[in-house]
Image (tube, rainbow, N blue to C red):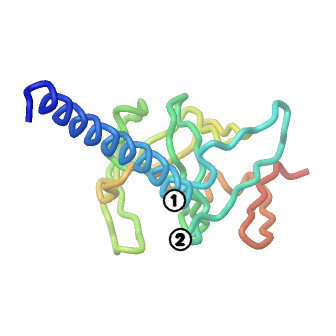
Amino acid sequence: MSAPEHDTRRIGRVMSWLAALALLGVLWLFFDGKVQDQHNPNRNIVVEPGSQELVLQRNRMGHYVAPGTINGRPVTFLLDTGATQVSVPAHLGPELGLQAGAAAQVMTANGTVTVRTTLIDELGLGPFRVRQVRSHLNPGMRDDQVLLGMSVLKHLEFIQRGDTLILRMPG
């Protein structure tokens, strides 16, 4: 085999490997998006200006997860009607501008936990804004989801139909 022929074959193999890597990259991006949609089907939710309603789809695990804000910073909420207050993972506190207050004991699904009280200046969920929300920073929460408890949800009406939850302002 001559040198130019050998070089051509080497270039062909390199191009084949690059094409395979590109295909793997495209497949990874596609399936990563599908997995994220199963976990949070509401992650790209759009709320019409002036709307007083938020429509959420249940995720694969049967939960309602939605994007929102705490003090103007983006967060992901897990709606939890069994939680009395908003529970923020303690590691997110500084990033969200939350000050750790007094220690308190709370009952969770995993038992009693010592948390620090805090106050959220403004919490946003879709078209809804709630100010001065009593909350706590929970050191036992390891992920980045914020439990949105009844201290906020009590201000809204709920209508559940199948895998859809509609939240509205009362009135």
Q: Are marks 1 and 2 in contact (CB under 8 Å)?
A: yes
- In the rendered view of the protein, which quadrant contains the N terminus? top left
Please tell me how crowded label 1 is: few (under 14), some (14-19), or many (20+) other residues with Cα within 10 Å.
some
Q: Mark 1 vs mark 2: which is more N-terminal? A: 1
Q: Secondary structure at mark 2?
A: loop
* 13, 162: nearer the viewer: 13
Label 2 sits on residue: 61
Could you say where residue 162 lies in the image, as x and y percent from the top left? 76, 73
Q: Residue at x 80, y 70 (%)?
A: 161
**Residue ranking furthest to the top:** 4
* 82, 31: nearer the viewer: 31
Which numbered disc covers residue 66?
none
Q: Residue at x 14, y 28 (%)?
A: 7
Which numbered disc covers residue 39?
1
Please tell me how crowded label 2 is: few (under 14), some (14-19), or many (20+) other residues with Cα within 10 Å.
few
Seen in the picture, residue 35 relative to 81 is either above or below; the reply is: above
Could you say where residue 69 lies in the image, as x and y percent from the top left? 56, 37
Q: Secondary structure at mark 1?
A: helix
* 99, 78: nearer the viewer: 78
Could you say where residue 146 lies in the image, as x and y percent from the top left? 47, 51
**Residue ranking furthest to the front:** 1
Distance of mark 1 from mark 2, alpha carbons?
8 Å
Q: Residue at x 55, y 28 (%)?
A: 72
Residue type pointed to by label 1 = His
Horizontally, residue 171 falls left or right of residue 40, namely right
Seen in the picture, residue 90 relative to 73 is either above or below; the reply is: below
Residue type pointed to by label 2 = Met
